[in-house]
Image (tube, rainbow, N blue to C red):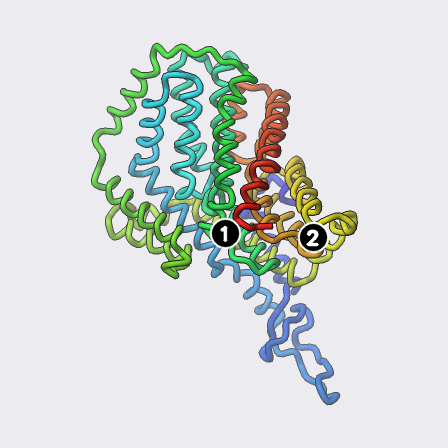
């Protein structure tokens, strides 16, 4: 609730929460004999086998603090942390901007062409930049705004079909690309982690990408023409090509750093996709990439230290993981899941899966943060699915897709959407309406083409 109502940063709120939970001994501690108990029961006596009395040997405050910081050694936290630095290298070298400009320059002969160029830019960058806000707001957004200005749109006039078309396409493409890869958005690894802990399944880079590929790519393909029908923009291309050439010239020739970065990124992609064959964990691959980029002088240690977005996300993500794990350890997640499952106990597993995923999708209206939505609801909905006998991989991929896709429902769901919505090219009431309409289109694709695809690959 504090995350929804407080004016403090998420990290500050979580720091306070971890401190309070530590001092009140509200975590689950592990004793010297291997028992898992509430930390406030440390140093108390219990009757063991044979009627003998024993003491729970653990430190109530120290043990609580060990639990509070355990998320900082979690592989998920380190995967996202390392991926942020890879994203910094993409931004620092200008490679991300070069790719985006090349796509817009080669495809920018029509409104749909520009729309598809923005979509492709997001798709190319998404596997390597785990912050959808950094990717959309830091790399793609400046180019989109430059294109809008080149098309003769006055940013001060308010609503405009041209600006609205490109803004809504860019915001939606950012969310779709986030749903395609486990590294596409900071909250995605939490979905994979909760699926592993509740269903006992591995849902790594390749499983996620294979499962999401067909429905997500089809939604991406339908996005520009759908928004074009809604807004019917009329574009003036007089100054666009000149503006693109000017920005290309400012970037200069491809640098040695960009070549080194490309080689590193391709290596990462091969190792991530081939994790089952190479046996190298995705987090190790990301960590290796950071070390290589530093040794190749693409990044400096100063870049790593100054990347405050990476450190901030590392802190709040690790804290969220601890809280989610403790909710599970205390039985709260199972209790919520059981409560959710009662209304569906007489339905078939497939109906239960669809119903739970729809409820998860539209619950996004309650949140102003995609990551908060994932942390709050992914675990309970998985627990409900487990009780109801839902196909594990089917429910996991639906939650994985909907965690990002649902962000288009509101103009404040995540930083990247808020950046585009705040430009005023589309009024807030219209954004809600367009978001709902596009969500309906996405749901139709997921529950038709998606279900056929997942049946083909044997996920239910």
Q: Say left or right for 114 vs 320.
A: left
Q: CA distance from mark 2 to mark 1?
A: 29 Å
At horizontal 59% and vertical 40% (from top left) the residue drawn is 402
Q: Tell me the quarter of the picture where residue 282 sits.
A: bottom left
Looking at this view, is 405 or 286 the one in front? 405
Secondary structure under the numbered disc 2 in the rendered image: helix
Q: Residue at x 66, y 71 (%)?
A: 37
Residue 225 numbered tag: none
Of residues 41 and 152, the one drawn nearer to the viewer in this rendering: 152
Residue underneath mark 1: 315
Q: Residue at x 51, y 26 (%)?
A: 223
Label 2 vs 1, first from the N-terminus: 1
Q: In the image, which disc is placed on residue 384? A: 2
**Crowding at mark 1 (Cα within 10 Å: few <14, some 14-19, many 20+):** many
Q: Give residue 328's quadrant in the image.
A: bottom right
Q: In this orientation, does residue 5 appear?
A: no
As rendered, which of 112 and 245 lies closer to the eye?
112
Q: Secondary structure at mark 1?
A: helix
Residue at x 58% of width, y 54% of height:
195
């Amino acid at each position: 609730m504090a995350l929804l109502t407080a004016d403090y940063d998420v990290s500050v709120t979580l720091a306070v929460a971890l401190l309070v939970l530590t001092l009140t001994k509200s975590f689950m501690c592990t004793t010297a004999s291997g028992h898992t108990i509430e930390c406030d029961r440390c140093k108390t006596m219990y009757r063991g086998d044979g009627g003998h009395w024993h003491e729970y040997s653990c430190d109530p405050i120290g043990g609580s603090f060990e639990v509070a910081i355990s998320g900082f050694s979690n592989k998920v936290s380190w995967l996202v942390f390392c991926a942020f630095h890879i994203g910094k290298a993409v931004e620092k070298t200008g490679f991300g901007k070069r790719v985006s400009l090349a796509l817009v320059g080669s495809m920018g002969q029509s409104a749909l062409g520009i729309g598809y160029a923005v979509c492709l830019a997001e798709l190319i960058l998404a596997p390597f930049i785990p912050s959808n806000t950094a990717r959309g707001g830091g790399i793609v957004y400046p180019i989109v705004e430059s294109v809008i200005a080149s098309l003769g749109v006055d940013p001060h006039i308010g609503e405009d079909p041209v600006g609205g078309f490109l803004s809504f396409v860019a915001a939606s493409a950012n969310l779709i690309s986030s749903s395609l890869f486990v590294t596409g958005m900071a909250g995605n690894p939490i979905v994979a982690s909760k699926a592993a802990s509740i269903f006992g399944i591995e849902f790594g880079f390749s499983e996620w990408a294979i499962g999401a590929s067909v429905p997500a790519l089809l939604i991406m393909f339908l996005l520009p023409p759908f928004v074009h029908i809604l807004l019917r923009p009329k574009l003036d291309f007089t100054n666009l090509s000149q503006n693109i050439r000017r920005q290309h010239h400012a970037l200069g020739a491809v640098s040695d750093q960009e070549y080194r970065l490309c080689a590193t990124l391709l290596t990462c992609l091969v190792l991530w996709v081939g994790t089952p064959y190479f046996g190298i964990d995705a987090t190790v691959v990301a960590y290796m990439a950071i070390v290589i980029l530093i040794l190749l002088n693409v990044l400096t240690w100063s870049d790593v230290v100054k990347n405050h977005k990476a450190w901030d996300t590392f802190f709040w993500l690790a804290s969220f993981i601890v809280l989610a794990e403790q909710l599970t350890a205390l039985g709260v997640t199972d209790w919520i899941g059981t409560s959710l499952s009662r209304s569906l106990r007489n339905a078939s597993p497939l109906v239960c899966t669809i119903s739970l995923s729809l409820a998860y999708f539209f619950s996004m209206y309650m949140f102003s943060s995609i990551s908060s939505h994932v942390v709050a609801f992914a675990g309970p909905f998985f627990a409900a699915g487990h009780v109801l006998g839902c196909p594990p991989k089917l429910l996991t991929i639906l939650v994985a897709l909907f965690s990002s896709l649902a962000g288009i429902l509101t103009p404040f769901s995540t930083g990247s959407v808020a950046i585009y919505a705040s430009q005023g090219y589309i009024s807030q009431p219209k954004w809600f309406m367009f978001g709902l309409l596009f969500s309906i289109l996405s749901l139709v694709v997921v529950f038709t083409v998606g279900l056929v695809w997942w049946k083909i690959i044997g996920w239910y």
